[in-house]
Image (cartoon, rainbow, N blue to C red):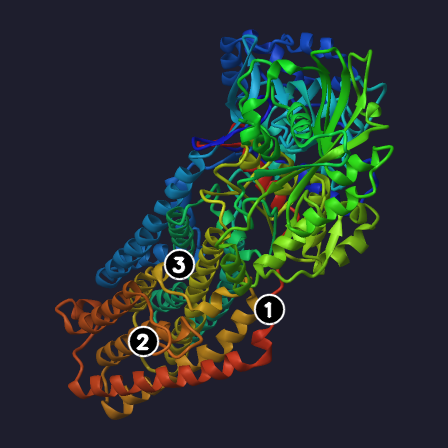
Amino acid sequence: MAGLWACCWVPSALPALNTRAVRCWLFMARPMPRRCRWLRAPATRTPMSLPATAEAASTAERPIASTAQLTAEQVLLDLQSTDSGLGGDEAARRLAAVGPNALRTHKASPWLVLGRQLRSPILILLILTAGLSLFLGDATNSIVIGVILVVSVGLGFSNEFRAERAAEALHSRVTHTVVVLRDGTACQIDVVDLVPGDVVRLSLGAIIPADIRLLTSKDLVCDESILTGESLPVDKTPVPIAGNASLGDLACILFMGTIIQTGSGTGVVVATGGRAEFGKIALGLGERQPETEFQLGLKRFSFLLLQVAVGLTTLIFVANLLLGRPLLVSLLFSLAIAVGITPQLLPAVVSTCLAAGTRALAKRKVLVKRLVCIEDLGDMDVLVTDKTGTLTEGHISFTAALPARPDVSEAGLFVLGLVSTEADYSHGTVSTVGQNPLDSALWEAPAARVFEPGSHRRMDIIPFDHRRRMTSVLVADVAGNQQIVTKGSPEDVMVLCADVPPQAQAQLNEQYDAGARVVAVATRSAQGMSAIEPADEQGMLLAGFLVFLDRPKANAKESLVELASLGIRVKIATGDNAKVAEKVCRDLGLVSGGTLTGVQIDALTDPELGEAARETTIFARVSPEQKARIIRLLRQQGRAVAFLGDGVNDALALHHADVGISVESATDVAKDAADIVLMDKDLGVLAEGVREGRRIFANTIKYVLMGTSSNFGNMFSAATASVVLSFLPMLPGQILLNNLLYDTGQLAIPGDRVDKEQLQTPSHWDIAFIRRFMLVFGPISSLFDFATFGLMLFVFNAAPGEFRAGWFIESIATQTLIIFAIRTRRVPFLRSRPSAGLLWASLAVVAVGIYLPLSPVGAVLGFDPLPVPFFLALLAMTVVYLVLVELAKQWFFSRPVQQRPAVRRRGPFHHVHRRAARFSVPEPLRSP
């Protein structure tokens, strides 16, 4: 479809930092007047340095407000372009000169990943200290530490980089295209290949791909809320602006990232990438793809542990110096404790979870465009959807023509319906491609085969739009009689009729009660007219009703039950009559919380509608703008709102939702606007996607809880013992080896099973919950460590090497096996079985942990052999430890404070990041 963006599966990109833009956006997040006075054009603009062949592309030298004061012809002259667009060679030269129209980069950089692995100052200090120790003669311990660190960093790097490569491949499969004129011919190109001077065609639902000066427009209205924070749309016209004006008043400029709410137009690109107004804001947030809420939460958690580690490390270091231990030994030991506390493989675990989730969703026929979408999908607790194709089969069939007047026959009414479609029947053969489903159903009906195209000549047409909800045509028959035929929603068409037969409303109600979709047809004489406009739609005579049937889906009821079990409330937003929607919901067992029509919605203020939308289930006869308004108000209540739509009229709502969902059979503009594409328009498939998103969060949190219980407890025990004992309870290299073995076993967590109750509601990051968990289960871990210390000292009279070997084995066994208790709120194994991968990985880690102190390399690592009775005591202690943890777990999760849902937090930049993600390339960005 000309002027629409297409979504297909191919590559994308990103730019530099602009703190001024961030400050502007922070200010924008607050309420502001209708015209935003802060949106002033910058006084100066950094000029693009272009070669002589592309100098004209540098309209960026001119402030955008000045560009708006020029006529369209002057702007084209400045850009050395024409209304037929650029030539292909010239466009290529300009692209090479100014760079891609990109705001994000999705290239996986091994150096950045390695830098993240090494960015911990504690880790760097440990490496330097180990090197100094090697230089001073302690070669064995230093080499052991070095090898363990290399293996640990390498393990984290390989897993995280592999996940980043998967994310890069995912982004590279998705491209967003735009229709431009090149060499005078309309063609689709990747949005990142736009250059200043390109002439672009845009229509309903499109996201503006760059800052554009309008050349022509038809009823063009834009949603600029991404820039201004204002919900009211802005009228756009090519007329130049007189005098100075703020950016919010530049009616002839289309700003990058904003959405066409109605109408269409053409324009010439004046600024791309980071030179566009939206680009400056997006680049102010960074060039990389945004971190997920998982990753941001984990960053906060890691910072919490880092604070604990720094404090603990400092105390241990000072205490060991006061006890007279060597400086380097004390420093190595305290730094090893800090490394043991910090979750080094956490980024790898999260990235692996997200990448695995993408593959799992693909198998379930759910295609995600960005990794962050997986989290958004699991976060969903409200789904707003049309009923056609989701609750119903989506195959609409014509069933009957019901004349409203005696002088109109069924066959005559059917013919009036045919001639008032938007299909071109003048050549005989009629294609239903691109037509709305109701018009297609008319042409596919058996009665359409006998229609004589030459019997009616179309002279003019007023296409369907979602405000009027009708189509009107001016037609003439073979005798030369002209009439206007109007076809549309009965409520809107009947208002235009001068004399509605008394039985008509009863006929209509009967069909609505049966769940049928109904279209009204009205006519009036139009002799002597050659064209029509909406003002001519008056004084009509109701001819009758065309009846259509769209049966409920066989599996829709089961899918609704499935979504309800996941804590998702389904709301219907439809252009159909309220009675039809209510009938479908009753047939499917969907309990309605009430119905609001488009007329009622317009009569409500935002606070009133927000309150009503909370409980209302059905929104009938709603326009695209009303759908978007409903979604916006639901989001303001803290709900995570998904919207499922497949038509051009759904694009606005898809952009406003937290997660936009479309289907493979949808229009290009709907697929382009969506974050997630379902290969089947099936709510059951969507439910599977939600489960996968929640499964990822549940498995990620398992690793976090491990780090805050046994891992933290063991490091605390080591710190305490180092002060009490006359020798170090574990050597630095032994601590790092313990941590490496433990982390290796936990890499199997992303593939673990998740209990059904963990999927029933969205889970959000809750640092307070993690802190409470740490304060309960950390001391339990330390308690059994102290019991091991007592056993080794007072029962076995262990030497330092034996003590270290005994505690190393006990620490690995309890720290690793505790995952089976922490991974579920049920009784482990009996009521919740772990995945085979996690089970065998954990047992393998325990086996290696027991073997190493007894192996030939045990002496090199600083271990001495242990007596056999120790292992019997270890088995008993491990069993008691796991039982005590299970009892503590039951008590902990039964407390009311643990059952409160976490508050969902989403910053003001979420939609900016989401909108900017479409302008992405797999390469570093140039500075604008």
Which element is circle 2 on?
Answer: helix
Mark found first going from the N terminus, 1 or 3? 3
Foreground pick, 18 / 434: 434
Mark found first going from the N terminus, 2 or 3? 3
Q: Is residue 645 above or below residue 5?
A: below
Q: Is residue 65 visible?
A: no
Which element is circle 1 on?
Answer: loop
Q: Is residue 391 above or below residue 226?
A: below
- Mark 1 or 2: the one toward you: 1
| Quadrant into which the N terminus falls | top right
> What is the spatial separation of the Cα atoms under label 1 and label 3, in whole angstroms?
29 Å
Q: Is residue 423 left or right of residue 579?
A: left
> What is the spatial separation of the Cα atoms under label 2 and label 3, in whole angstroms?
18 Å
Q: Residues within 10 Å of mark 2 (few under 14, many from 20)?
A: many
In the picture as drawn, the residue positioned furthest to the bottom comes out as 795
Q: Is residue 244 left or right of residue 227?
A: right
Foreground pick, 122 / 190: 190
Q: Find residue 811 and name its label.
A: 2
